[in-house]
Each structure stands twice: as C-alpha cells, then as structure tokens.
Amino acid sequence: MLKLKQKFDLHRDVVSDILRKEASVCRVKEYSGAVDTRILNIERDGGILYSWKGATGTTRIGKFDSNTKQNKLLYTFDKQVCVSSCSLNKEETLLAVSLAQNTRGEERLKPISKCLTLLIEIHPINNTKVLKAVDCRVKVQFLHAETDRRSVLESHLLLLTEDGYVDLYHVMLTKQEGYRVVMANPERLLKTAERIVEDFCWLQWDGHTQRVYYLTHSVTHTQDQFLMRCVQFYPNHNCETLLEFPLEFPANLFRTVNFVNLGFDHYHQNSPEQEPLRMKVFTNIIGSMCVCYSQHLKARQEVIYTVLLVHNDCSKTFRVSLGSEQKAPHLHPLFIPIGYHILVYLQDHFLHCINTRQQEMVCHSLFLSGPDVDLGLQSESADVTVLHSEEESSGSVLDLGSGRIHEAELSPAFLLKILRAPSRCPSSKTDPQRMAALHCLLVYLGNDPHLELKITEWLFDNVNAFDSFDQIQEFILASLYRISYEKSLSLDKVLPYSSVLDKKEIPACLLEVPGVLCTTELHIEPVFKGKARSLQGFWSELQWNTERTQYLDADPRYRPSHIQADWDKLRAESRPSSHMNRIEENTKKVLSMVDTWCLDKKLVPLFQEEDHQHRALIGLTVDKLREHLNRHLPRLGKKKIDSLVVNYVAKLLELIRHMLESAWLKYKLGPRVLCLKQQGSPGEWSVFHFMFRILEATRGLCLPLPPGYHTLLAVFAVRCLPQPTFLQYVDHGFLQLTETFVSRLMTDLDNSDANERLKFSILKRLPEPMEQRIYHMWDHPVSSAWISRDYVRTQLEKLNKSKGFAFSGRDKPGFRPEFLPLTYLAKILSDIEEQAPNPFEEQENVDARFVEETALKQTLILLGFDGK
C-alpha cells in the first residue's frame, strides 16, 4: 500500500562519520567504542540534531544538514549529560537544551532540579545562560521565520513546560570583533519572556508552518469542555490565536501533559496507560485541516479513532472490530498524512486510507486488513513518529529504533493490483476496494500519463460494468474532477466526482465496510479570530472552505444527469431561438478550445464533422454548469466561471478522445477502420465494444460526446455486427444514423443483394430531409426514380402556381413519339425549364431528358427486359 523511500539513515549518514572523527581524536585507525547516537530534533530546514557519547566521556551535539549531507559539531559538554530537548536557531549561533538531571548516587544528596534549561552561544562557543531549573519537563524550540534580511541579530525561543504554559523569549544578539555573535544584555533575558499559552494539557508544534496547536480544558457555568486552539507565529515574531473549536473528551482523560513534534526525549517515555489519547493535527496548503485521535481501550477487541475534518465542518468516528481470535492491541494506530489522505495504520491488524476530500461515502476510502497491511516498518508504532509538512504531498516516517527516515507515498502498483483483483472474489468485497483504489489513482496520483494509460488498459480488460458501479463513469467524472479542482480549489465541493451519487438507490456494499462502523457528526463550529480573515494562503482557504460548507445547500454538487429533461425539450425545438443561439455560441467556444489542443492529434477521426445533435448537448451542458457555479460560487466572478465551465466540457471531450486514442494504439488501428467493405478484426470488435460502453456510460450521465463519435461507432457496428443485429441497435436507439455515415455507406458499398437490403433498410429509418439528400448520393435505379418523381412533382407544383403559362406544343429532337404520355410530360417539363431556372440541373444534372430516360429504364426493369 505504501512505498517507503529512505531519506536518512542514522548509522549511514551520522554514526559512520562520528566513528571516523572519534578515531582521529583517539589517534587510532578504527574506533571500536560505542557512541550511543540519538536523534534529538528535526528543525524546519530539515536539519537533524543528534547527540552522542564521545570517546573522552563527554556528550556532544551535532547537526546533519539534509541538503549538503554534511555533519557539523555544534557543542561539547564537559561531562556526560542527558539531553531531553534541543533546538538550534536558524543562523546557527544559539543552541537551546533541556537536560534531565541525574539524581542517582552522590547527586541524590544535593538539592537539584529535575530539569535544567540552558541557552548556549556557539558562534563561537562562549557564554551559557540558565533559563529554567524546575522539577518538570521543559521543551525548547526556536522559531524559524522566513525573512529576507541577510543579517539577523535576534532569535526567538519557545519554552514549553509540563506545568502547562508556554513562554516566548526574545533574544537580542550583537556582533563582537566582526564575527563573534553573543547575547546582548543576557541579564535582562528572563525579563523578555512573554506568556503565550496557559493551562494546556496537550500541545503540538508545527515547525513548517510555525504554529502551535494546544488543547485546554474550559469550564464555564454552562458547560465543561475542551477547546482546541491554534496560535500562528508571523515573520515579525508576533503571534495570535486564529482558530478555536470544541472537542469532547472525558474530563479526567489527561493525567500528564502530552507534547507532539517537539523533539525526542529518550529519558521520558509514556507507557500506553499513560497515553490514553494519541492525537495529531494535519494541515494542507489547499485549505484542509484534520484532527486525528484515538483513545486507548482496555480489554476491548476493537479500535476507535476519529478524524475531524475542520474544512468540511464534520467528524468521522470509526470503530474497527478486531475479532475475538485476535489479541487486543496495547498501542495506538499511526496517523500518516499523504496528500489529502490520512492513513490509519495498526500493525498486524488493519490499514485505513481515509479520503478527507470526498468523505461522504466510505467506498471512497480504502480499508484493508490481514496480510496486505504490512508497511515494512521494523518497529512498533510506539517507536515510529510521523513527520509532516504542509507543502509536501507525501508524509515521512521516522523509525526511532533503527534511526531511519522514510518518505511515504501511496504505491500505484499496489492500487493497480487491487483494481485487477480476480473476479472470483465476492463483488461485495472487491467493488468498494476497487472504487477507492480507482479514485486514489485518478484523483490523487492521476497526473502521471503512464499511470493513466495503465488504468485505461484496465478499462479495456474490464469493459462490462461492475455490479455496484460503472467504472467508465467513475473514470470520466474522477478525471474531470482532478483536472478542474487543480485550476480552482473552490470547485471541489460543487463538481461531481462519482457517478454513485447519481444513483436512486446506492448498493449496500458501497455504504459499509465489513467490520467497520462509521458515524458522522456535523457542525464542528470552528471560530476564526483576529487576522485570520485578512490572511492569504492556508488561512484564507481554510476559512473559505468552512464557511462555504456551512452556507452551501445540503447537496451542492452538480448532477449531470439532471439536465436530461432540458435536453429532451431542446431536441423537440425546431425553430431557431435566442436560447438556441446562446447554446450554439457555447458549443463554438468549447470546440474552438479543443481545436487548439488537438492540432497534432489526428489519430482518431473525431471532431471532423458537424454533429448537430451533440453540438446542442455540448452547449446545453455548458449552460447548465455555468448556471450551477454562478449560484453556488458567485465569488469567483462570471468571467472566471465561464472560463472554467468551457474548459471543463472541453476536457470531457478531450478525455474521451484520449481514451479512444489509447485503444487505437493498443490494437494498432489505422485508416482502414473506416473502410466499410471489410469485416471487422477481433481488435476492432474490442474497440467497438469499448466505444459502445463509453456511449452507454455517457448517456447514463447525459454527457456529450465529441462530434463524429456516432459516425465512427456506426462504422464499427456495420463492420462487426450481423446486419439484423445492426438494425436492431438502430431501432433501439443505441446507434445513431448520421448523414456522414449513411452517405459513406451508400457510396462505399456496392449494390449487391445483401448491401442493397441494408441500404433500403437504412433509408426507411432516416428522417425525410436526410433521406432526400441521401437519394442524390446513391447511384441506383431506385434513387434515380425517386429523384425523377421528386423533380416532376416540384416542376408541376411550380406550373400550378404560375400564371399565364402557355404550352408551346413544339416537338424537340430526342423525344420519342412512340409513347405519347411520356412524350407529353417531357414537353411540359421542357417548356417549364425554358421559362424558369431549374434548381436541380446545376448540382444533380436533372432535367426533362433525365426524367424520360429514367422512366424508360424503370419500365424495362419492371417488364424484365433489363437488369439493375
């Protein structure tokens, strides 16, 4: 499920370098002593702080630069100490450490505090300032603000204590002798402390975004509750509480203060009983915030975890039954963020990939149990820490036991394996997993053309719809959803992403996961404060997402199938109107955009003809989608919405063209597929079946197809189907007889008995205006007779309408006097031609002589004196 890519190995990147340096200090070829290297903290720039026991019996602190892959010694203590917390300022001039004091042996008799917090000048090594000496744990963390200033002579340090408060120290610096950086007025340092947070029971530091999340217990005269708050630090080192929302926990849940993402304390570790709650906050730059937590349950054969989706104003609580035969876990599951997915992993039990963007239905989140859930981590979850960056799409996992950091990514190969699961498995089990895997591949990983080709090949191999969903509909909607929200994040709540939501009755297997009970609670009621409303980036998007969720309708997503009634009404219109003109303008915009994309893509013969019916559906789709977005997202503006809508429909047509292009390449089809004289090959039969399923899928959603699609499908049908079956497809509306197709069929096929029967059968099924045009294209006695009759009727109608017409009575050469009725009719037509222009003559060479010859030919055929 996860693809782990190693980014850091403590032994390879650090220990081997330390051993070389210690050997140099001891003047030996190879140092054989133990160095006891421990990771202490990971700063915002990716630098890894670590400590080790030196050859001279001292403790040293170093830094591994993740960019240069170089190690640097920062400070050496004059004895062995227990470093429980450590942080380095951005300029690498100050080092803050918290030491766990040793109270064993002789030290026990001295009055000594359990924790000593120091601020050390290291550029060069100089003064040391004691910040705290207390009997509780103290965490240290420098702020790493982004700034354009080249020389910064100030640093800002957070001290976070187990007593439940956070202080911010403003450390002013000065340069001496041109290079020495020292503290200015160190005696006044303690007076600069600013109390930022008070009375917290849980706290998380986010170094990449410079935020503190903390939980405080709020007791008022009306209620007893916990409040989650977020403090944002700005580049000028000021800070402000921007967000708070309530959380429900038992009042006595927290017996000790819990710190998250504040380094690694190797001298204080909570047992599972001391950590009744594991909680982490994850954010994404697109404006999503998830609070994930699990509670420790004693002697229960189930695991309960909650994912609170602040951006969607709801929370999801999952109860996973482990089964009576399985041992109850004593650890909490891991929460691993990957893009907008949250992976919940409990070793040897289950893995749940939760889709935090499409959270409405459980079938869009992948749940696995059994042997498929091994992530390859060597340690238990208690020794594994998840590292997260808001800007990165993948999470990282630190295995403290092995000292390795792995970048965690979803494995496309594993997800494709789920898609290709054998059909012998029960569909109630495989269909939800296929649905979740397909959406993960298309929406999250869909930017990879090679991967998209593999998915399309899977569609070829699994053309028939599954029991609970149509995979081609899912492919189209999910792909369009990804393409569109990449252009505007605001579209993710109003565009369709799954055809399942269009079903009148959703299959039961898509609404539940065996062994997993999901409950949803709405209305988290987040409150934005201070500058949150005026900030750009994450805070602006998060606020917009939450407010939009609150004011949008219960079902704000566009439903393409809902335009079916408008489409039926539009097809019934025969006269031009302003509405029809607007729809045609919409179509022109879409096809113009597609033309600019397809200049060098002529493999599949689409977009090469006028398809009036589907041109109208293209324009209507633009019209209805524009109307929907204007109603739900007015802040985008009409110009932006118009551009997004035209792009959406153009991408739909281009996506279908791309699907057919993949089929063309797979079966090596060429121009010969348009030749109606040959039988279809097995590859062409497969493409016909695939095209027919695309037609079925788009028709079910009332989505338009590219102009020329119906012509191409009819050509494949004539080549692949028996004639009676072909005509049945036409009669049931599955095949559309376009004028381009019929004219090609009339001219390409000879007039053999079988082909004649087919042509006559098709002519009977054509609307009258098209039938008239087709007769003029077919070189056949029947078409000549029809043209002659139509010509005579037209000329005689003209005679009846004309006034003062005089019959000349002259005989003309070329008329045969032997058959007087025909001779008389020919004379009448000839005289009419002399007095009025003949509209047939220029294009069809139809005149009185043509009528006479056709009549005689038909007479000979009827009498049996001449063949066709």
Image: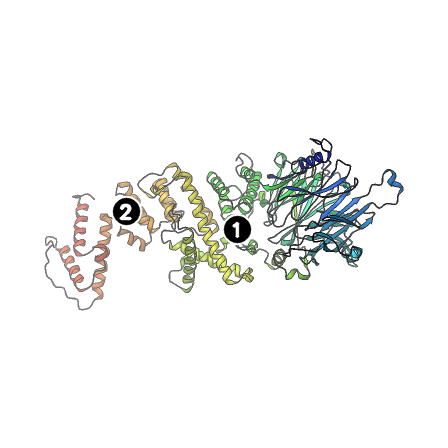
Observer able to see residue 463:
no
Image quadrant in which you'd find residue 534: bottom right
Q: Position of residue 237 (x, y in %)?
A: 70, 57
Q: Position of residue 198 (x, y in %)?
A: 77, 55
Q: Amino acid at mark 2?
A: Thr
Left or right relative to 148: residue 134: right
Observer able to see residue 696:
yes
**Circles 2 and 1 in contact, beta carbons < 8 Å:** no
Q: Determine the residue positioned at 52% across, 51% down.
A: 481
Image quadrant in which you'd find residue 851: bottom left
Looking at the rendered structure, the secondary structure element under dot 1 is helix
Q: Which mark is residue 481?
A: 1
Left or right relative to 147: residue 741: left
Q: Determine the residue positioned at 33% across, 51% down.
A: 739
Q: Nearer the viewer, mark 2 or mark 1?
A: 1
Count of numbered tags: 2
Q: Which mark is residue 747?
A: 2
Is residue 277 or residue 210 the one in the foreground? 210
Image quadrant in which you'd find residue 59: top right
Q: Position of residue 238 (x, y in %)?
A: 70, 59
Quadrant in which the N terminus is drawn: top right
Is residue 168 or residue 638 the one in the foreground? 168
Looking at the rendered structure, the secondary structure element under dot 2 is helix
Whole-angstrom CA distance, mark 2 to mark 1, is 43 Å
Q: 10 Å neighbourhood of mark 2: few (<14), some, or many (≥20)?
A: some
Q: Determine the residue positioned at 86% across, 45% down.
A: 112
